[in-house]
Image: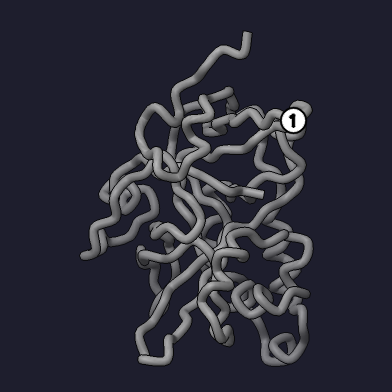
């Protein structure tokens, strides 16, 4: 799973990287994004890319209680077309979740050691995500998102059994806008377009990434500073 990540670049850098306008809502950088936090996502609205502010933890449009979002921070790539919580968003509401690194914990007996994982050049990248808009009883909207997970690559396998689905830059546009569908295809579930999109969800090349141990300081969501990503020695 992916339970914590970072977005240390500012909103202007995110806007440049993903070719969107800077939103009017301030979105502060974070060294320790935790579930239910507000995060930037890149979604398609009215046929164009936009940066939105979303709760991390997907609340399906049909949900009775928004608390369900705390349990839906991740979506397994292999069951997207089957799970009621995700299949509508997978077909119609895919998004990019900007990040510059994520945390995972390696279990060693009773001890869980946190690791920070990022690109070798510390650059921004995009998790493959899903998003939804849920309407409260008073009519106010809640935008929310989930991060898709896949099998680990060679770098991640010794640390954890899953990793977030990181899209190659050349696949980001396709993930957002999808493939063309004809009328007959729209009547089937899953569609061939959905199956082709699922092929974009695979472990990211490990030779472009690095991982190193960090302090258990990051374990507390209240701690959000550069100290979270500082490497430590395990000797």
* Residue at figure coordinates x 73%, y 58% from the top left: 199
Residue 104 drawn above or below residue 120: below
Instruction: Indicate the quadrant containing the C terminus: top left, top right, bottom left or bottom right.
Output: top right
* Residue at figure coordinates x 36%, y 66% from the top left: 52
Residue 143 drawn above or below residue 212: below
| Crowd rating for badge 1 (residues with CA inside 10 Å; few <14, some 14–19, many 20+) | few
Quick one: 220 or 10, which is closer to the camera? 220
Task: Tell me: 49 left or right of 28.
Answer: right
Q: Residue furthest front?
A: 110
Q: Circle 1 is placed at which residue position?
A: 110
Q: Position of residue 164 (x, y in %)?
A: 63, 48
Task: Tell me: 28 left or right of 83.
Answer: left
Q: Residue furthest top?
A: 235
* Residue at figure coordinates x 47%, y 69% from the top left: 144
Quadrant assignment, res 103: top right
Whether residue 58 is visible, yes or no, is yes
Whether residue 175 is visible, yes or no, is no
Per the image, label 1 sits on a secondary structure element best described as loop
Colour scheme of this structure image?
A: one colour
Q: Position of residue 141 (x, y in %)?
A: 38, 82
Total marks shown come to 1
Task: Tell me: 37 left or right of 132.
Answer: left
Q: Position of residue 150 (x, y in %)?
A: 72, 51
Quadrant assignment, res 187: bottom right
Quick one: 157 or 110, which is closer to the camera? 110
* Residue at figure coordinates x 63%, y 80% from the top left: 88
Quick one: 113 or 187, which is closer to the camera? 113
């Amino acid at each position: 799973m992916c339970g914590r990540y970072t977005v240390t670049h500012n909103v202007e850098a995110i806007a440049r990287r993903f070719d969107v306008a800077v939103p009017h809502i301030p979105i502060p950088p974070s060294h320790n994004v935790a579930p239910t936090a507000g995060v930037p996502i890149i979604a398609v609205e009215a046929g164009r890319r936009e940066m939105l502010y979303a709760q991390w933890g997907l609340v399906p449009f049909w949900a009775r209680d928004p608390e369900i979002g705390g349990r839906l921070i991740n979506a397994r790539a292999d069951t997207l077309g089957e799970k009621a919580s995700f299949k509508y968003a997978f077909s119609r509401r895919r998004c990019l979740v900007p990040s510059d690194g994520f945390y995972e914990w390696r279990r060693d007996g009773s001890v869980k050691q946190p690791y920070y994982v990022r690109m070798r050049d510390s650059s921004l990248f995009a998790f493959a995500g899903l998003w939804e808009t849920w309407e409260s009883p008073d009519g106010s909207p809640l935008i929310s998102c989930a991060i898709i997970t896949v099998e680990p690559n060679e770098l991640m396998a010794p640390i954890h059994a899953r990793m977030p689905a990181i899209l190659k830059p050349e696949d980001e546009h396709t993930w957002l806008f999808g493939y063309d569908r004809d009328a007959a295809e729209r009547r089937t579930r899953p569609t061939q377009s959905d199956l082709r999109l699922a092929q974009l969800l695979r472990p990211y090349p490990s030779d472009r990434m690095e991982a190193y141990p960090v302090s258990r300081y990051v374990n507390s969501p209240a701690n959000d500073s550069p100290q979270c990503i500082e490497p430590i020695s395990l000797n």
